[in-house]
Image (cartoon, rainbow, N blue to C red):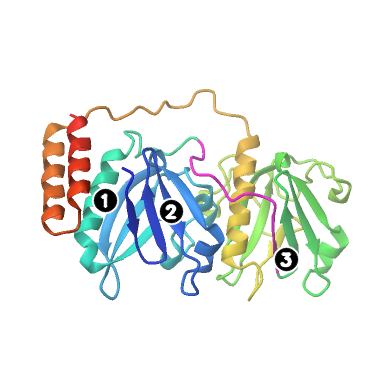
Amino acid sequence: MGDVLAGIHATWEFDTDAVLIRFERGIRTPKLFQSLRERRIPYAALSSVTLTPGKRGTVVLRAVPRAGADPLVEAASGQLKEGCDPYRLVLPAEREVLAEYYADELRALLDPASGESADRFLVAAPEAPMNFKAYDGRASFDGERISFRWSWTGASSAKWKAGDQNFRVSELAGIVWRSPEALDGYLRLVPRAAAPVDHRTGGSLGDLHGPGGGDAEDGVPAGAPAEPPSATADQDPAAVLFGLGYGPVHESLPFAAAVLESVRRTQPAPASAPVLVNAGRRDPADIAERIHHLGELHRAGLVTDAEFSAKKAQLLAEL
């Protein structure tokens, strides 16, 4: 598409196979957006596009990600507040017609398999190295190993007794992230193996959780070991606690997403993966409707003569 749509807190740039979302860095911009800076979202990672009325004279264009396509969304597991959703673009209400045009353009680019869950992450995770300060320690990730260094002011006696922890990505089945905006916020690492070993020596992950089937609501992948009720985060050496000012969303969520992506990458690939197929030629009636819509934008002065001619030629070429 090659077009740019500027909204409040973000700008969407439409490329041939993806939309590049660039977030502003102003004081009014959510800190999570500032932390992410920019994200490239392949059209294959989207399931649908919506346009709805917003607050105080705005409209909201939202690209809905496919299940399993974005490690950040998977780690958040529905816990992000609406204003921190990186897939929302808020625009002034007077730009609704233009936003509707781009919504239609995006819908036309969705993959035929957009309604299905993705078999792998299609959106890049935040890059390591990264770290953040939790309530009871400091967490760091270098791309291959996660380390927890306990704080003498916040860590429980159980964690002090266990000592500082080091976990290799290959030892993990997944993660559980509970928003620090909740009373029991924490980041927990979910083990793959079950052989008890002292992590201070860099050995395999110990039996911190019993076997189980996993719970999608807990952010644990199917087949991953489930945590027993007694394994509270403040006593679990595989978890760090959040608190007021400790482990904020804009630090701990990108961290969790980066770990989750690395964990998935180390797991065996499925025996066969679905092949994504291009949509092929568009329906002539759909093309005619889009050209008509484009003409309305042109007459309203929202599209220049050059933009109208170029876009019309592009649409006709798709017949």
User: Circle 3: is it few (<14), some (14-19), or many (20+) Cα within 10 Å?
Assistant: many
Examine the rendered structure and indicate whether residue 246 appears above or below residue 109. below
The residue labelled by disc 2 is 21
Say what amino acid the circle numbered 3 marks: Asp
Please state the extent of the stretch shown in magenta in the rendering: 120-134
Q: Nearer the viewer, residue 229 or 15?
A: 15
Q: CA distance from mark 3 to mark 1?
A: 47 Å
Tell me if 238 is positioned left or right of 56 in this view: right
Q: Dot 1: what SS?
A: helix
The residue labelled by disc 3 is 234
Examine the rendered structure and indicate whether residue 170 appears above or below residue 253. above
Q: Dot 2: what SS?
A: strand
The residue labelled by disc 1 is 102
Note whether residue 242 is visible.
Answer: yes
Residue 256 at x, y percent in the picture: 61, 54
Tell me if 56 is positioned left or right of 74 in this view: left
Note whether residue 232 is visible.
Answer: no
Residue 2 occupies quadrant: top left
Examine the rendered structure and indicate whether residue 271 appears above or below residue 235. above
Tell me if 75 is positioned left or right of 235 in this view: left
Q: Check contact, mark 3 vs mark 1: CB within 8 A.
A: no
Of the numbered discs 1 and 2, the one sitting upstream in the chain is 2
Say what amino acid the circle numbered 1 marks: Tyr
Q: Is residue 127 magenta?
A: yes
Of the numbered discs 3 and 1, the one sitting upstream in the chain is 1
Secondary structure mainly formed by the magenta segment: loop
Q: Nearer the viewer, mark 3 or mark 2?
A: 2
Identify the residue at horizontal 75%, vertical 68% (top origin): 136
Q: Dot 3: what SS?
A: loop
Say what amino acid the circle numbered 2 marks: Ile
